[in-house]
Image: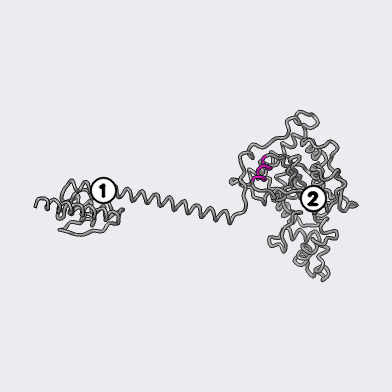
Amino acid sequence: MMKLTCMFSFILLFGAAGLLIFIHLQDPEEVVPQQASGMRYGQGSQEAKREGASSNDQGGKTQANGGATFPVGNQRASLLQDESVKHRSSGQARKALAGIRDRQRKSSAANSARAYQRRRKFVLKSSPLRIAVNGSFLSLPVLKAEAKDELRWRNLYEVQRERKRIMRETCSKYKSNNKRVITPYHVSRIFVEDKYRILYCEVPKAGCSNWKRVLMVLNGLASSTRVIQHNTVHYGNYLKKLDGFDHKGINYRLSTYTKMLFVREPFEKLVSAFRDKFEHPNNYYHPVFGRPIISKYRPNATKEALRTGSGVEFKEFIQYLLDVHRPVGMDIHWDHINRLCSPCLVDYDFIGKFETMEEDANFFLHLINAPQNLTFPRFKDRHSNEERTTTQITQQYFTQLSPSQRQRSYDFYYMDYLMFNYSKPFEDLY
């Protein structure tokens, strides 16, 4: 009989403990510290009331008994008659609750990891190729040390230092480069010469044809710049572009090669492009740009002008350039240098100017140890009988415009004027 009683008590206690653990597993957030107080029904004490209020604050349900308000969770305590059993059960409950929370944390971490991987895959699929700018860009290579010691190059070296300083300060003031990320688009105008480790950013109407000739000679593709024809330069595809390399190849060349570009006074560059593309026969620029320009900006245009696109006037061309709703997009020949070469991302080692082309170009060739018989060519391979675009010719074209159009044109190229330290071309500009 005694054994039967013990067995029955053991089964009852084991069942009660199992029930408590089951309830905890079903609603772990409802467990509060006061539930271990051993409170009984009908005791309506202030402590019980405080416990009931606490559970109500946490969203627990209540039940009235003898005028006292209790959390429903306190009914579980009435099943426990023996204090030792109660402590063991509550200990098991705490262990079970700790296990549940641990599994929840692991599950949450796993879900976060899976979500991150999904987001990463989406970004990689939907974003353009990106190349992070590494620390080497913050400690840029300087010009050769021995060049600073030679008296004949000292002034040119100081000119380069000043140009780079102005460019960097302008970028710091006006450009936000917090991300410091370069995409293949940013280097799509940069030509590569691997033998002498040169990166050259092409700026149209700033000596780019002759610079490509020089790169071809340096690469061993020709013996002299004079034997290379214009079409060979621009359509022969003999020179590689930086965006044709993979991540590693682009990063390596940006970090170790000498990066250079040559710029030109923006208004003068613009007039040179207009004269070249619109004042001479051209089977691309006349139909592609000329026809929509004439159609939109010339009242009562003739059928012949609308058909051929020939005879675009400079004032019409400026109207197109300044129109936010252009009938046809931009072209590299009159786009901003700032957009073509991204000097705030690609920190160029050498900045030459068209206005001082001969001395700048030959100084650069000296710095890279080019063959001594190689000098920068000065011949004009297109419209060679026509006078080069000068400051005087540029002013003649811009006097055709109203003061407002000149101001807006200056505003359009303002960053180029500022970044490369060109003076205002007209006194009435602000």
In depth, the one of 361 and 369 nearer the eye is: 369
Three-letter amino acid code at the position of disc 1: Gln
The local secondary structure at tag 1 comes to helix
The local secondary structure at tag 2 comes to loop
Q: Position of residue 31 (x, y in %)?
A: 27, 52
Q: Position of residue 16 (x, y in %)?
A: 20, 54
Three-letter amino acid code at the position of disc 2: Lys
Q: Position of residue 120 (x, y in %)?
A: 53, 52
Q: Which residues are magenta?
A: 248-255
Earlier in the chain: of badge 2 and badge 1, it is 1
In depth, the one of 219 and 44 nearer the eye is: 219
Image point 45% across, 52% down: which residue?
112
The residue labelled by disc 2 is 205
The residue labelled by disc 1 is 92
Q: Position of residue 146 (x, y in %)?
A: 75, 29
Image point 83% across, 69% down: which residue?
304
Is 135 part of what is drawn in magenta? no
Up-down relation of residue 212 to residue 297 (above or below): above
How many other residues sit within 10 Å of disc 2, few (<14), some (14-19) or many (≥20)? many
Up-down relation of residue 391 to residue 297 (above or below): above
Image point 66% across, 48% down: which residue?
246
Characterize the magenta stretch by its predominant secondary structure. Answer: helix
